[in-house]
Each structure stands twice: as structure tokens, then as C-alpha cells.
Image (cartoon, coloured by chain):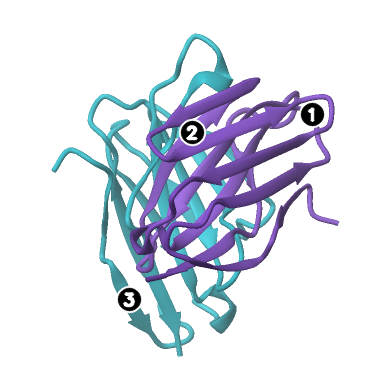
């Protein structure tokens, strides 16, 4: 399977614990995005990387959230001191930068569903 | 008011019906995406368009830049088309790479 993969697919944790999610993008893609989706809502942008550089972070990404893409390939999203409001689906997408920004198509992973008790 | 609005929010159709899902946006865009999300979360990109019309099988997407409106049509709908359809836009002149998403339209096609 050469698509975007995410692990784990599901995570249940207690409030206050730290969690880390992993995203493996399509291998030749240089852009990687993290989104959060709550029930009944569309995805919301969290952050994105071009190669290993984190180019933008949403104001939704509080200090408890950190994302890395150390070698420009896979990425991790860590949430520290989880809160019940962090319960959501965390989606990763990757794309290959086209000549024009709007030419890129993002390919989404299956998501990691987080439940904070 | 959300920057990307979809209607209807929920749609139930009988197999074979022609379906239209609408998307209106309030920001300047460089491109618009239609995405399909199945139960369990996986999202598939259906179309990316910046003008005119695109067709793929039974799916047709149109966009009117002047009216800031796009439609997704499904002809001869089938139960396997049941999913959430999401409209997302690249905000022209906005941040570098992120999409702004609508809340989605949940489609259920009954046999």
C-alpha cells in the first residue's frame, strides 16, 4: 500500500496523559499536513511541513501540541497533558508541490481517532 | 458565518436518483476541492477545480468563480455513494498551504 498511513488508528487515554501519533506520507511527497476533525464538523487545519520545515501552525495548535518531521519523511504529532476537548479524529495528508500552490492534491490518511476519558 | 458553507447538511436519496450538493464560499480562492469521507474517517479527493466543470464517471463538479459557488452532482446514485462529501477551498492570498473545509454533507442512498 503506497498511500498515507497513520498509527495508531484508535487511541483511548486518560486526561492528563501524553499521546503521540505518527503519519507516514506518500514517499515522494514533500508536503505534509495535520488536521483535526470533531464529530459533525469538517477538518480543521493544524499545521503543515514542507520537507522537514514546519511552515505554518494554526492558532488551534496550543502549547500542548507539537509536531515534528525530522527527516522530511514521517511526522509525529504529540499532545501533552491531554484534555477531554482533544477528543477528535486527527487526519494527516500529504501532497507534492506543483508549479502553482493551488495545483496540489492532498492525499489523506485514514486518521487516528483519539478519545480522552 | 463559516467561510465555506455546504447544503444540504444531510441528504437521503433513493438509488438511481440524481443528487446535487452545493458549496458556497466567502473568500477569494485559487482552487476548490470536493472530498469524499467514508465511515471510519478515510478521505478521498474527488476533484480539484479552479474553473468550469470536471467529470469523472458518474460524478460531475462545477464551479462559478463570480458567484463563489460550486456544485457536486452524482448521476444514477448508488448505495455505495453513501458517504460524507466535503467541500474545501484554497484561500487565495491567505496562508500558504492549508485548506478551509465545509462541514460536509452526509449522503445516504437507499436501495
Quickly name the residue at label 1. B28
Give the image quarter of residue B50.
Answer: top right
Secondary structure beneath dot 1 equals: loop
Q: Are marks 1 and 3 on the same chain?
A: no
**Any part of residue A13 in sight:** yes
Residue A80 seen in render: no
Q: CA distance from mark 3 to mark 2?
A: 31 Å
> Residue B29 at x, y = what percent?
72, 28
Percent x, y of residue B106: 55, 65
Subunit ID for the residue under disc 2:
B
Q: Which residue is mark 3?
A: A11
Which chain is in cyan here? A
**Which residue is painted at 44% across and 19% down in the image?**
A97
Q: Residues within 10 Å of mark 2 (few under 14, many from 20)?
A: many
The chain assigned the colour purple in the figure is B
Identity of the residue drawn at 55% across and 80% down: A83
User: Residue B47, labelled with which disc?
Assistant: 2
Place of residue B80 in the rendered image (x, y in percent of width and height, measured from the top left): 34, 60
Instruction: Give whichever of A27, A75 is nearer the camera.
Output: A27
Amino acid at each position: 500500500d503506497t498511500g498515507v498511513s497513520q498509527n495508531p488508528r484508535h487511541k483511548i487515554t486518560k486526561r492528563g496523559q501524553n499521546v503521540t501519533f505518527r503519519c507516514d506520507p506518500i514517499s515522494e511527497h514533500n508536503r505534509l499536513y495535520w488536521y483535526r476533525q470533531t464529530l459533525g464538523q469538517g477538518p480543521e487545519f493544524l499545521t503543515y511541513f514542507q520537507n522537514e520545515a514546519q511552515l505554518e501552525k494554526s492558532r488551534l495548535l496550543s502549547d500542548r501540541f507539537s509536531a515534528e518531521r525530522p527527516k522530511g519523511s514521517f511526522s509525529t504529532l504529540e499532545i501533552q497533558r491531554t484534555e477531554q476537548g482533544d477528543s477528535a479524529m486527527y487526519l494527516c495528508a500529504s501532497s507534492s508541490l506543483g508549479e502553482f500552490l493551488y495545483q496540489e492534491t492532498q492525499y489523506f490518511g485514514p486518521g487516528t481517532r483519539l478519545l480522552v476519558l | 458565518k463559516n467561510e465555506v458553507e455546504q447544503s444540504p447538511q444531510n441528504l437521503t436519496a433513493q438509488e438511481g436518483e440524481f443528487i446535487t450538493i452545493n458549496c458556497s464560499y466567502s473568500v477569494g480562492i485559487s482552487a476548490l476541492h470536493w472530498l469524499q469521507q467514508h465511515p471510519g474517517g478515510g478521505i478521498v479527493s474527488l476533484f480539484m477545480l479552479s474553473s468550469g466543470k470536471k467529470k469523472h464517471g458518474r460524478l460531475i463538479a462545477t464551479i462559478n468563480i463570480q458567484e463563489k459557488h460550486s456544485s457536486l452532482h452524482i448521476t444514477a446514485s448508488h448505495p455505495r455513494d453513501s458517504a460524507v462529501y466535503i467541500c474545501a477551498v484554497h484561500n487565495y492570498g491567505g496562508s500558504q498551504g492549508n485548506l478551509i473545509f465545509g462541514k460536509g454533507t452526509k449522503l445516504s442512498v437507499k436501495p
